[in-house]
């Protein structure tokens, strides 16, 4: 029995990766939930918008790197992030003006808007593949580890190591800052309040003189920032591949629905629920169990409930359970 | 210009495009477009049943198509004697045990009184069932996969004629649709879309990872041909055929590939005609009118005593079965099952583009959309490369020019999106609108 080593192994392989992945999912799900709350449709183009925003950041990062601009131990991508957000925001406002506004004015059925977002998805996907190609891109630089496995072992003298990668730390810190800023904006500023009013009751908001076009524009700006940040953090932490970003659509939706569509707090909670379930169900528990249990009970098998290839099945399973037993989600969301 | 004339002209236009491909490029590629166009038209008919008739937004088409492909393998692949019947039955038995566990848990949830006992009982059933399932199933899988992994390692097929797999693919897809429909129908339209999107991904993940089933990413190759279609090699050794080919002035290789594709086209056209006829009959029947009434106003239809949930389940199963049939046909034509080739953009969303552009709610429109969009999907790539060569002809050779020409292949996604947006905006009812 060696509970300390068991805990370190658990933290290294489950808690910390789950925390980073959960932060990335939470940011993505916030974007989905905001579009749903304000514009009232499920945005299927979300994953590909994220790929587009990340691509913008990557291109600017490469340009900075070629100019010799670096952030020292931090990845250069952080410096490129604001510019990437600006580009993505411009594209999203343009998309809204040319595509979505027409259907909003016509008060089309939400399902038509979902179709329209499929069209946008194709176009974004095409643009991303056209500019940067369908392959993996690596753009992380700077210091790789905050605490490397070897340093940790030397520091503590334990058998197991707890390595903290810079990208993980940056992900968590950035996510906390972004979420704090978003909630401050939604709860304290005039524009934020008008957004919440618009989300709660459109007609009443219009009656009290809120300009819907402005609310929509601000929403797209925030969504652009959230998706670009989420995509960049995911790319730094794992890697950038357009198809993977498209596939993230499912965990995003799952997180947003589990938390309650249209509810920002729910989206964050949902992100972590999905992330931790995915990691715990697909992790092989043999190592932790070997440390935690008495020697005579040490397991022979890997103790893995599902292979990692089925992580979609996990987010999907949770989604299904929530939809069947509590369709409005853990935190009261809309069920229009 | 009346409708019949307009529709005829549209179809003549498509035929012209395909025949033009024959003259400009080659008859082989023209026939290939025709064959895949026929299959796409069947898939579009299936989606039109769900969306056009009943307003169900299914984004899991890829999964049903893949299940149809799996049916082809299970029916027609060479049997693997080492895995058959013992271990194969054990694996299937294990799966059935898993299903029984879930069924039992659902039963317990429904029958027992609400309270802590119910939760504990259901949990106990699930846990015991899970470990029993893993014990039986894992043992069987180990035996099956240990058998000659380089060429087999799966349960193999039944070695029956592959034509049988077409209806069976439909049945397999219908079975999956029943399970999905039971859980996901009755949710809001976008929830159904998200749920089906997830299920399709899971079906593909199963095909990729369960090596015992259809060898996963090691792929199944060399499936037999359907009944009247011979192998090219056989044709090339058949003196009567060689004589006829020579009479037409064709060399044996071209003649044999053309003849094989032509036979496939005839087979597919027969299936398309049957399904189209059935779909048209359904549309003009009282059942079809009821479906449209439900689509247009669920509350009113329910007030008239229609069982909306049941009808939705029914049409969802029917549409998915049609997609499964098309999937089995496609796998028979390819002669192989490659799980990695199933991409949602190609097998789910492209079919949606076909239905919307053709005209949702109209069977003829779906068929037209199937042919037209498939033609564009194939031809935009060479056109894009040609266009890009023209645009960049002024540029000096370098990294930018080669990058632009290399990426031109991705233009087709962009084109499909643009087409979809243009049609939704300016002609939302499609090329052949519903009457």
Image (cartoon, coloured by chain):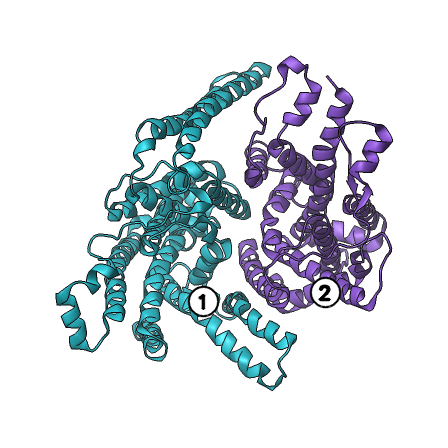
Chain colours: A purple, B cyan
For the N terminus of chain B, give its image quadrant: bottom left
Dot 1 and dot 2 within a common chain: no
Along the line of sight, which residue is nearer the eye, A169 or B249? B249
Residue B64: x, y in percent? 41, 47
Residue A105: x, y in percent? 62, 64
Is A92 rendered above or below residue A293?
below
Q: Is residue B24 left or right of residue A169?
A: left
Q: Quadrant of residue A319?
A: top right
- For mark 2, does the 10 Å Cα neighbourhood hold few (<14), some (14 to 19), or many (20 or more) residues? some
Q: CA distance from mark 1 to mark 2?
A: 29 Å
Asked if one can make out residue A278 in the rendered structure from this viewpoint, the answer is yes
Residue located beneath label 1 in the image: B377
User: Residue at 26% across / 59% down in the picture?
Assistant: B273
Q: Is residue A258 left or right of residue B212?
A: right
For the C terminus of chain B, give its image quadrant: bottom left
Asked if one can make out residue A334 in the rendered structure from this viewpoint, the answer is no
The chain carrying label 2 is A
Residue B173: x, y in percent? 37, 43
Residue located beneath label 2 in the image: A59
Please identify the residue farthest to the bottom as the structure is shown: B394
Please identify the residue farthest to the left as the structure is shown: B240
User: Residue at 53% across / 44% down in the picture?
Assistant: B198
Secondary structure at badge 2 equals helix
Secondary structure at badge 1 equals helix
Along the line of sight, which residue is nearer the eye, B226 or B183? B226
- For mark 1, does the 10 Å Cα neighbourhood hold few (<14), some (14 to 19), or many (20 or more) residues? some
The chain carrying label 1 is B
User: Residue at 58% across / 27% down in the picture?
Assistant: A302
Along the line of sight, which residue is nearer the eye, B150 or B162? B150
């Amino acid at each position: 029995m060696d509970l300390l080593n068991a805990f370190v192994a658990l933290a290294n392989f489950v808690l910390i990766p789950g925390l980073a992945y959960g932060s990335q999912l939470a940011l993505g799900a916030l974007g989905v939930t905001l579009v749903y709350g304000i514009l009232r449709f499920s945005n299927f183009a979300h994953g590909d918008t994220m790929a587009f925003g990340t691509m913008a950041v990557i291109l600017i990062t490469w340009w900075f790197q070629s100019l010799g601009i670096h952030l020292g131990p931090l990845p250069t991508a952080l410096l490129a992030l604001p510019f990437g957000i600006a580009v993505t925001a411009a594209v999203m406002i343009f998309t809204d003006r040319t595509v979505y506004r027409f259907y909003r004015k016509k008060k089309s059925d939400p399902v038509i808007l979902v179709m329209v977002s499929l069209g946008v998805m194709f176009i974004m996907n095409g643009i991303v593949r056209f500019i940067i190609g369908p392959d993996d891109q690596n753009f992380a630089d700077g210091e790789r580890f905050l605490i490397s496995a070897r340093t940790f072992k030397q520091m503590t003298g334990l058998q197991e190591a707890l390595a903290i990668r810079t990208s993980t730390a940056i992900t968590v810190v950035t996510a906390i800052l972004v979420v704090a800023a978003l909630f401050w904006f939604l709860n304290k500023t005039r524009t934020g309040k008008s957004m919440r009013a618009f989300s709660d009751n459109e007609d009443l908001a219009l009656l009290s003189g809120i300009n819907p076009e402005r609310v929509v524009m601000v929403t797209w700006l925030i969504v652009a920032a959230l998706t670009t940040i989420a995509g960049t953090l995911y790319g730094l932490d794992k890697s950038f591949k357009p198809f993977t970003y498209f596939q993230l659509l499912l965990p995003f939706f799952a997180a947003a629905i589990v938390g309650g569509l249209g509810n920002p707090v729910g989206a964050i909670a949902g992100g972590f629920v999905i992330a931790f379930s995915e990691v715990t169900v697909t992790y092989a528990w043999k190592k932790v169990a070997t440390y935690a249990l008495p020697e005579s009970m040490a397991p022979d098998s890997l103790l893995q409930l599902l292979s990692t290839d089925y992580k979609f099945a996990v987010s999907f399973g949770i989604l299904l359970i929530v939809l069947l037993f509590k369709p409005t989600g853990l935190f009261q969301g809309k069920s229009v | 210009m009346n409708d019949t004339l307009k529709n005829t002209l549209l179809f003549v236009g498509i035929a012209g495009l395909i025949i033009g491909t024959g003259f400009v490029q080659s008859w082989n590629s023209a026939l290939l477009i025709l064959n895949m166009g026929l299959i796409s038209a069947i898939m579009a008919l299936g989606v039109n049943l769900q969306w056009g008739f009943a307003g169900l937004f299914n984004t899991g088409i890829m999964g049903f198509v893949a299940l149809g492909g799996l049916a082809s393998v299970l029916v027609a692949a060479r049997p693997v004697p080492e895995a058959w019947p013992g271990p194969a039955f054990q694996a299937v038995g294990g799966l059935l045990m898993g299903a029984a566990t879930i069924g039992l848990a659902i039963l317990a949830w429904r029958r027992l009184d609400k309270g802590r006992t119910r939760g504990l009982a259901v949990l106990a059933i699930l846990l015991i069932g899970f470990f029993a399932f893993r014990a039986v199933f894992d043992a069987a899988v180990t035996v099956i996969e240990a058998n000659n992994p380089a060429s087999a390692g799966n349960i193999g097929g039944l070695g029956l004629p592959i034509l049988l797999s077409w209806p069976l693919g439909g049945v397999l897809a219908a079975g999956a649709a029943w399970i999905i429909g039971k859980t996901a129908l009755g949710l809001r339209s976008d929830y159904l879309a998200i749920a089906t999107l997830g299920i399709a991904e899971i079906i593909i993940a199963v095909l990729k990872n369960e090596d015992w089933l259809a060898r996963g990413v090691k792929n199944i190759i060399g499936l037999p041909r359907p009944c009247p279609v011979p192998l090219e090699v056989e044709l090339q050794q058949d003196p009567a055929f060689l004589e006829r080919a020579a009479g037409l002035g064709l060399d044996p290789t071209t003649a044999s590939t053309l003849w094989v594709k032509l036979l496939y086209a005839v087979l597919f056209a027969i299936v398309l005609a049957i399904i189209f006829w059935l779909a048209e009959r359904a549309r003009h029947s009282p059942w079809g009118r009821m479906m449209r009434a439900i689509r247009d106003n669920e509350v009113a239809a329910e007030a008239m005593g229609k069982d909306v949930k049941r009808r939705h389940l029914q049409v969802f199963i029917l549409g998915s079965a049609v997609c499964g049939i098309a999937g089995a046909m496609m796998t028979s034509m390819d002669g192989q099952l490659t799980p990695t080739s199933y991409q949602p953009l190609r097998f789910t969303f492209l079919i949606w583009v076909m239905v919307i552009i053709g005209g949702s709610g109209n069977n003829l429109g779906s068929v037209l959309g199937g042919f037209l969009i498939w033609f564009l999907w194939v031809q935009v790539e060479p056109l894009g490369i040609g266009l890009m060569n023209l645009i960049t002809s002024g540029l000096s050779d370098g990294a930018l020019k080669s990058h632009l020409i290399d990426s031109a292949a991705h233009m087709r996604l962009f084109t499909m999106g643009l087409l979809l947006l243009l049609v939704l905006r300016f002609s939302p009812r499609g090329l052949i609108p519903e009457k």
